[in-house]
Amino acid sequence: MKKFSNLLIAICLLACVFSCSKSDEVVTVSQPLLTIGKAVDNKTPLSGSIKGTMKSDSVYNVNGDVFINENDTLLIQPGVKIYINGNYSIVVKGTLLSLGSKDKPIYFTVKNVTKTDQIGADPTTDPAYKGLWGGILGETTAKLLVVKWTHVEFGGGKATVSPVSFIANNGNTYPLCFSNPDGVFVLEDSWVYGSVDDPIRTFGGKLHVMRNTFEKSGFTGGECLNIKSGSVGNFAYNLFIGSATNGSKASNNGGKNPQTTIYMYNNTYIDCGYRRAAAGRGGSINFEEGSRGVAYNNLIVNCKYGVRIVGANGTYLGNTLVSADTANIKYGYNFNYVDSTFIANEIYPTGFATKIQSTDIPAPGSFLPASYKPGQVYDGSAVVGKNNPSFVNFPLPQTSKRMRDISVVGTYNFRLQSNSPALGKGFTGFSPLANGVPVSANFGATEITPPNKDLGAYPSDNSGNKH
Amino acid sequence: MQHFYKIIIFLLLSNQLLAGSLKGKVVDSRTNEPLVGASVTVKINDKKIGTLTDLEGKYEIKNISAGTYEIHCSYTGYKKAEHKITVTQDKITFNISLTETSIDIGEVVVKGSVNKETESSARKSEKNSDNILNIIPAKTIQLLPDITVGNILQRISGVSVVRNSSGDGQYAIIRGMDKRYNYTLVNGIKIPSPDNKNRYVPMDIFPAEMLERLEVVKALTPNMEGDAIGGAMNMIMKSAPDHLTISATASTGYSQLFADRPFSGFDSKGIAFQAPSEIHGSKYVAVPSDFSVKHLNYQEVKLPVNSLFGFTLGNRILNNKLGFVIAGSFQKTYRGSNSIFFNPNGQPSPDPAPNTPLFDKIQKREYSTLQTRSGLHTKLDYLLNANNKLSLYGMFMQLDEEMHRHTMDNSFTVLGDESILDRSRFQRQNIYNATLQGNHTLTPKLKFNWSAAYSNATSKTPDWTDLSVTYKITMGADGKPTESARYIDPVTHIWTHNQDEDKSGYLNFIYDLKKNVEISAGGMYRTKNRSNFYTSNRLNTVLPGADRQVFTTINQAIFSFRPESDAYADTTNGNNYTAQEQITAAYIQGKVLLNKLQIVGGLRAENTSQSYTSQLPVTAIGKTGKIEYLDLLPSVHFKYSLDERQNIRLSYFKGISRPGYFEFIPAPIAGDYFDESGNYNIKHTQSDNIDLRYEIFPKGNEQLLVGAFYKNLTNPIEYGFQQVGNNSYLYTPQNFGNATNYGFELVFVKYLRNWGISGNYTYTKSSITTTKRVYYRDANGFIQNAPPATPEYPTPPTQTRPLQGQSDHIANISLIYKNAKLDFDAQLSWVYTGKRINIVSPYKDLDYWQRGTSQLDFSAEKRLLKNFSVFVKMTNLLNNPIIVEILHPNTLGGLPEQTQDDKILVQKDVFQQTYLAGIRYKLQ
């Protein structure tokens, strides 16, 4: 018994010890927001050189071109609203950190403008395509441009007197632009709405563009991501809806090093390519003029063209597009859904070098002739309406609404239902391109999300687009 | 019968006695030079028998029996001569010498100016000049097939021309030195250019018939402005004659080009000279109805007729104190070309080899250009007294060009987009000059002259409009290409105008120190004000709902400003700028005659002060700029006269070339692939030039010149890549160290009775090394540009090449027939321009080279009545095209128009023949 009581005491003591350790406080306090330099005063409208920190939840007005000088940093805390009151730009010669959060996104926008987002709204009167201010323009000296959880709206107007070296006076700006091949440009979890021409153009940079949503990109021309020489990076988990031309395009023109190399994977492209004024240019993914990279796991729905690789032709065809670095582009596992024969005939664009991949969906063998050669004219009517990707909320087949009328997300939800044929078809046997973009909450990418087994921007494990 | 023979013999003998002949030579009494076309008449029994001297100054009058006669000889500009001769033999030789006319007014001697228009006087000037020059006089110009000065230039030794889109010479390349290295004078006064960015003057503005002489000066003396490294073109306009002179021409003709396809022109009437933003202010929000599309309507005319008129009226009145000449010219010519142009892609292909040529378009262009050239000039000189003379010169030149360029953008497209482009461009260029000059003899030893000149050059291209219509060719289900509907693309309207206003003053003192020593000194000041205006509006053709607009006719097209910002003026465009320039110069020059050796030399100082205001933002470097520099320009010219007819010349001069006004401005101008910009760090070019020449003038109008030249250029201006940021480059004008240019020239003119042959040949060799770009694939398979430094190219790639525009070989040969008796002149002219670089590519080994080309022209003139003659001028008889090539093995395959495996044809311009016939009236 004594033995027992001793044991009991010992157990009690042990329990006591355990319960004592359990009684230690678990303290969770909020971390201070990163602050750099002095607070930027928001009492007077901004113009000229600025640096320091824009304080959380403040409202700023920009009434002239503003410049972040070469060795300066401007930090924008969550919840900041920046109204640009005219055709002015934010010129980044040093470092800009726009660090919004899911709960408190940052806005670069204009005052007193109502979005006309009803389906079928006339683009020629839509404020999204008017270019109501310039853009966030990374100069050739910009070290770091980090944009997270930020809305960039209504930009891309004309620079009457261009504040940057790479845009001529009266030239169109781009809502986001980067031009330093040695600098880092991170765009994460953000929204880009509207632009006259390309919402994003890069003339060089180490790029990381992940989990963003692009709406109403380009009036009668323009790519959501128009990439020129000197640019190397990963574009993944982005949603492109209603782009004038392509969602993402890579080209090595412009004479900068290194060679443009872009990994485009797990993106979703909806109804792109229908506001392009000139005849046939592109509608989802384009590789041209000496660019290289990969295109895997993309989900392309009712876009004017499928993945288009511009290739050299043995005989002269007089095409103004110059061959991509075709030997160094890898692609496959791309999913195309089409609602018309016209688009079905361009899943593998005629006159171009895109090769069929057995991993593509629908299976090329199911609608292409056995003798099919890249660029050949074919009859794709067999795949019209086949392989509905089963989005959570986006009615397919798209019969009542014209392709060109869909340009915003609104209440649509491009997550995949559990019965989607796009689930589990992805290719994970490659790594994102290592290009020197640091992983950092404040000074780099939050996460370089690897490829997923599910196709498109919204994989079922929720590792993709968070919008 | 025997008697009969006797009669015959007698007749033959007597006939022989009767049929004596008189022959001889007419020469200038002072120089002994033969006078061509002098009239020689013999009075026999109140009947005049006469003839004219031939190209060697010789005459022959047959069938003169023995006896004593009066022989008269006359020649324009010379005093008439009268002699009594006795003919005793069957053939006698009688040489006549004539003395130049001079009009004595007190002590002043006014020389007849008509002489300066003759070939022998030109040769005389070349022989007697202090420095090295070549002259084409009016008499020679009259017989040339050329109607503009731009075309005449190519006839001059060492000069080749850059042609405009109609095939006419526009700019001169002198001894391989590009147009930027030469300047243009009118009566010795430098004139400004209507060009919007540069200094050089388009020479196709000037009608040929207004010239008394065209001189090309190839070595500068201290009293000349120093910014000509290649040479100075001096147009000496017709000056007041010593008696009433009237001449007029009217001619007409056509271009063979428009026999084969119609001329497609537009009506420039009603084109708004001012942009909406100029009328309403730069804040004006334009509406589509502000813009006319009338000039995008084209009318086709089959075989339009060219018409040309000219007149000259001159006299000396008020007791010979006031001399005047007024001359006008009006030329309305329909010109054009058919052209194929391979538009180079901004960057070549790295595969299969570095810098493999790549073209983004092959365009088929048809030009229809109506040129209306009008010129008016007047020269007055007034003799105040024996020691003081004033003269006033006024000139107004205008060239209107209505150019329609019709382009099939990818005319060899099998599949893909095809665009049809129409450009309507009306350009009006004006050059105005007024010069007041005074010549004063202060003391018998000291002379003084001055000039005050006002010049203004303007160019306007109002409402330059480009229309493009695009369709797509797709492969139909039947395997045949099918065309989509035609859609109208946005239409741009551009207004530009620029002005270069130039005020200058010149002073020269000339002092005869000793009998053989002359000292002169003087100075010059010029202030220049230049402004450039540019605005454009883009009218969109997108329809509500963003639908594309199907093209029917231009008049039915619906335009809008979408985005609305296009409705605002583009007045901040980088092409808007102003520039000022002040040049201050002073010189001292000495001229010494030591027996047979003449030395002219001295020193010139030129100070340049240049400034600009650009449209750059205040935050950018170089919104405004000021550039100042001082040059000391020594020169010395030796002329050793071996005898009356032979000289040996040796000269040295230092010359400069100033960068174009726009070349300093660091405003980036967007290119498709790389941006271009000016560069405020460029330095002006300096050059040391040496010339050696032997010349012989066997007879008045004959010559043989053999010469060699050497130029060492410091800081010539060439375009290359300039780093402007991290891994960012602009294509800018730059200095790439030194260049050399050397060569030799040969000029000859030889006459044999009625035939003449004249020709020249110039060999030039120049060399410049500049950085170039290589686009290649590195060892790891990545595509790279060099520069920047890469493992394969640790230093920037360079290329050594001739200067742009320099041909190794240029030559002219003319076969001349002149028959004074028949009053008939004819000339067959052949001009050859050797291979040269037309466009310098930023990429290594991809320069555009113009293939060696020749042109054959014919002209003839015949006098019908005393004062009337008829003439014909035919150009480009062999229809030789201009062909431009890249000297790269033709590995591309499938390109049209190719003829050779070792090069790629990238441009072919066909101009066809032109024909002109006219009538000339001349009273003098």
Image (tube, helix red, strand yellow):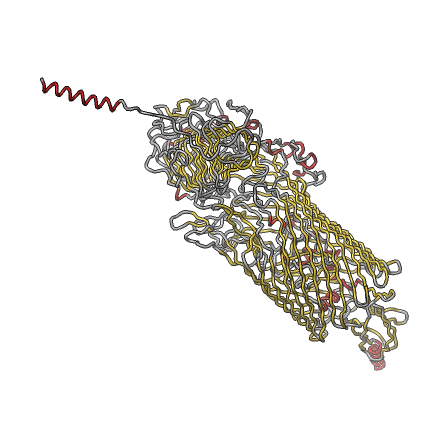
Screen quadrant of the N terminus of chain B: bottom right
Could you tell me which quadrant the C terminus of chain B lies in?
bottom right
The spot of residue A237 in percent (x, y) is 40, 31
Classify B625 as above or below B53: above
Q: Nearer the viewer, residue A35 or B348?
A: A35
- Residue B371: image x %, image y %? 70, 48
Q: Is residue B782 left or right of residue B683?
A: left
User: Which of B844 and B163 lies nearest the eye of the viewer?
Assistant: B844
* Foreground of the two, A148 or B205: A148
Res B746 quadrant in image: bottom right
Q: Position of residue B424 (x, y in %)?
A: 65, 41
- Residue B355 visible in image: no
On screen, residue A339 versus residue B643, left or right, reads: left
Q: Residue at x 89, y 60 (%)?
A: B319
Q: Is residue B519 visible?
A: yes
Q: Is residue B740 above or below residue B554?
A: below
Q: Quadrant of residue A455?
A: top left
How far from the left and from the top, in percent, is residue B544? 57, 27
User: Can you name the residue that lies furthest to the top here?
Assistant: A1
Q: Residue at x 68, y 73 (%)?
A: B640
Q: Quadrant of residue A381?
A: top left
Q: How many marks?
A: 0
